[in-house]
C-alpha cells in the first residue's frame, strides 16, 4: 500500500506519497523497517526521546500538529506528516492497512469480573461443535483457525487486534469470541468493532487500582453495551447490577439460577464428577450435564447456552455438545486427586472457588494464595478474611509481588485472619510443598492453589521469572 492511500485527509507531499508502506506502529520497541511510526505521547514514557534512535527503520513519522515544536527539536531526517488528531488518524490508518471492515466478522464480546474465560471457551467450543468456524481471543490463549497462540493481554491493543482480525479473515472464520476487559473498554482498544452479542457475566471487586471506585468500574462495563445498541445483550440476572445494566438496552436475553430469567437452571446436582441441572426456557425443560465443577459453572454454562441460542441454533443441538467440553487450564483445574489450581485472585473469585470445593463434597480445604504487588491493596485484608472463614488452613504466599516486599503483602493479607489457622511462607514453591505434605494421606481434604491459574511466571521487581503452579506441583509430587 502506498503512503498517499493512508493519509486520505492529510497533505502528503508528492515526493513521498508513492512510498510503499510495510507496516504501522506506535510502539518504539516493536518498530520494523518500512513502518509508519505514529508519535503518540504517553503518561509514563517520553516517546520523543527515542525518535532519533528508531529513525533508521522508520519510513515516515506521523505526529500531532500540536507537537510541531517538540518534533523540530528531534532534528529528524525522515519526513514527518502532521495531523490534527493523532489517535483518530492512527485508527484510520490501521483499519485501511489491515483492510478491516465491521461487516467482515460476527463478534461476540464477553465482559464481567469473573467467568469471562470459561464462558468464552464454552461458546467457542459450542460454535465449533455446531460446524461453525470460530476464533477466540482471551486471557489463556488465542485460537485462530485451530491453532493456538500465546496471549499478550486478555484484550489486545487496537493495532494487535487488527492484525489478528486480518489473519482470522484469511482463515475464513466467521465468528470471533472475545473476552472484553474493563481496561480495553476504557482505553478504546475495541473501538470500531460492532459486536453482534454483548455478554455480561457478573460484577465484583477488581481493578480498583485502575478504576478507583466500583461505580467507575460499573460505568466502564456498561459503556460496552451502550456503544453497541444493535447488539443482543446476554445478561446474568442473578447479579445485583443486572437491573441497572439493562436500563437503556433494547434487546436483552437473561439467564440465572436464583432469578426469574429467560434461561433458568433448576434442580441442581453438584458433585465431584461435574454438574447437572434442568434448563427451563419458555415452558420447556431440558436436562443439561457438564464435566465442569461448582455452582459458578452452572452460571457459565447457562450463559454460553443463552448466547449460542440467540444466534439461531437449536437448544437440543447445543445441549448435546455441552458435555464434551473438558474445561479451561487453571480454572478449578484438578491436577491430581484433590489438588486444584485456580486463577482466583479477587475476593469474590476466591470465595466462589472455596464454596465450589465444599459443594462437591470436600470436608476440609487447605489453601495457598497471595496477592499481586502494585495492585488494589484494599482487597488483601478482605481475601484474608474469606480464607480465614472458608479454609481449614491457609498458607499465605507470594503472587507477582512486583515492586513490593512480598512479606509486607503477606502481612496485609494476614490482617484479615481472625484465628490462627494460617502460616506465612513468602516463597511460593516452599508454600506449595508444605501444603502438599499437609494434604498427603487425607482423602477428604482438598488443596486449592489460587491466584495464578494458567500463568507461567512470577513478576518480581520488573522481571518475569518462570513459575507455573502445575509444574511445581508435579515436580514436588515426584519427589
Image (tube, grey):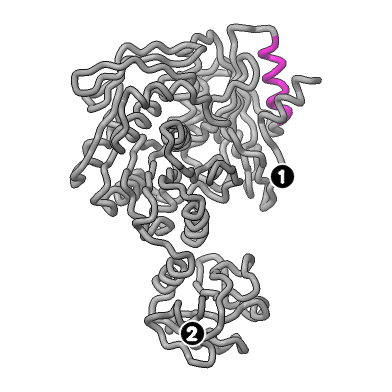
Which residue range is magenta in the image?
Answer: 429-440
Q: Residue at x 48, y 12 (%)?
A: 360
Q: How many marks?
A: 2
Please state which of residues 476 and 1 is positioned toward the viewer in this rendering. 1
Q: Residue at x 51, y 12 (%)?
A: 272
Please state which of residues 317 and 41 is positioned toward the viewer in this rendering. 317
Can residue 180 be seen?
no
Counting from the top left corner in percent of width and height, residue 32 is at 64, 70
Neighbours of disc 2 within 10 Å: few (<14), some (14-19), many (20+): some
Counting from the top left corner in percent of width and height, residue 200 is at 34, 38
- Left or right: residue 325 versus residue 398 is left
Q: Is residue 439 magenta?
A: yes
The residue beneath circle 1 is 465
Disc 2 element: strand
Q: Residue at x 48, y 91 (%)?
A: 13
Please state which of residues 325 and 83 is positioned toward the viewer in this rendering. 325
Neighbours of disc 1 within 10 Å: few (<14), some (14-19), many (20+): few
Spatial distance from mark 2 to mark 1, Cα to Cα? 41 Å
Q: Is residue 29 magenta?
A: no
User: Looking at the rendered structure, which numbered label has been put on residue 81?
Assistant: 2
Can residue 378 be seen?
yes
User: Decide: marks 2, 1 in contact (CB < 8 A)?
Assistant: no
Please state which of residues 469 and 263 is positioned toward the viewer in this rendering. 263
Q: Residue at x 42, y 81 (%)?
A: 83
- Left or right: residue 127 versus residue 216 is right
Amino acid at each position: 500500500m502506498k503512503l498517499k492511500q493512508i493519509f486520505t485527509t492529510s497533505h502528503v507531499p508528492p515526493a513521498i506519497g508513492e512510498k510503499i508502506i510495510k507496516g504501522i506502529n506506535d510502539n518504539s520497541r516493536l518498530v520494523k523497517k518500512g513502518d509508519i511510526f505514529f508519535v503518540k505521547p504517553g503518561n509514563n514514557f517520553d516517546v520523543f526521546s527515542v525518535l532519533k534512535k528508531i529513525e533508521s527503520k522508520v519510513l515516515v513519522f506521523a505526529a500531532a500538529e500540536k507537537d510541531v515544536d517538540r518534533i523540530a527539536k528531534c532534528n529528524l531526517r525522515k519526513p514527518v506528516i502532521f495531523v490534527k488528531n493523532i489517535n483518530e488518524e492512527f485508527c484510520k490508518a490501521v483499519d485501511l492497512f489491515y483492510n478491516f471492515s465491521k461487516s467482515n466478522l460476527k463478534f461476540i464480546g464477553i465482559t464481567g469480573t469473573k467467568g469471562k474465560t470459561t464462558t468464552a471457551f464454552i461458546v467457542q467450543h459450542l460454535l465449533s461443535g455446531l460446524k461453525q468456524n470460530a476464533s477466540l481471543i482471551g486471557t489463556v490463549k488465542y485460537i485462530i483457525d485451530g491453532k493456538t497462540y500465546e496471549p499478550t493481554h486478555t484484550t489486545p491493543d487496537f493495532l494487535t487486534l487488527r492484525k489478528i482480525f486480518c489473519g482470522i479473515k484469511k482463515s475464513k472464520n466467521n465468528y470471533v469470541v472475545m473476552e472484553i476487559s474493563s481496561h480495553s473498554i476504557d482505553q478504546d482498544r475495541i473501538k470500531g468493532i460492532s459486536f453482534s452479542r454483548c455478554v455480561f457475566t457478573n460484577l465484583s471487586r477488581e481493578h480498583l487500582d485502575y478504576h478507583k471506585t466500583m461505580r467507575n468500574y460499573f460505568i466502564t462495563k456498561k459503556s460496552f453495551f451502550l456503544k453497541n445498541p444493535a447488539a443482543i445483550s446476554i445478561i446474568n440476572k442473578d447479579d445485583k447490577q443486572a437491573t441497572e445494566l439493562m436500563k437503556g438496552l433494547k434487546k436483552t436475553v437473561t439467564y440465572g439460577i436464583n432469578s426469574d430469567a429467560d434461561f433458568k437452571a433448576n434442580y441442581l446436582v453438584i458433585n465431584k464428577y461435574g454438574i447437572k441441572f434442568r434448563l427451563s426456557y419458555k415452558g420447556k425443560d431440558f436436562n443439561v450435564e457438564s464435566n465442569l465443577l461448582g455452582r459458578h459453572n452452572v452460571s457459565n454454562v447457562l450463559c454460553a447456552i443463552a448466547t449460542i441460542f440467540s444466534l439461531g441454533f437449536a437448544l437440543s443441538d447445543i445441549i448435546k455438545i455441552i458435555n464434551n467440553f473438558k474445561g479451561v487450564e487453571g480454572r478449578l483445574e484438578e491436577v491430581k486427586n484433590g489438588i486444584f489450581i485456580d486463577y482466583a485472585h479477587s475476593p469474590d473469585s476466591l470465595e466462589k472457588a472455596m464454596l465450589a470445593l465444599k459443594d462437591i463434597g470436600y470436608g476440609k480445604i487447605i489453601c495457598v494464595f497471595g496477592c499481586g504487588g502494585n495492585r488494589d491493596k484494599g482487597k488483601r485484608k478482605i481475601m484474608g478474611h474469606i480464607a480465614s472463614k472458608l479454609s481449614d488452613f491457609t498458607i499465605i504466599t507470594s503472587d507477582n509481588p512486583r515492586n513490593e516486599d512480598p512479606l509486607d503483602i503477606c502481612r496485609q493479607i494476614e490482617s484479615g485472619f481472625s484465628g490462627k489457622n494460617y502460616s506465612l511462607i513468602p516463597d511460593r514453591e516452599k508454600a506449595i510443598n508444605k501444603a502438599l505434605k499437609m494434604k498427603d494421606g487425607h482423602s477428604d481434604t482438598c488443596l486449592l492453589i489460587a491466584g495464578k491459574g494458567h500463568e507461567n511466571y512470577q513478576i518480581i521487581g520488573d522481571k518475569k521469572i518462570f513459575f507455573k503452579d502445575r509444574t511445581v506441583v508435579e515436580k514436588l509430587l515426584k519427589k
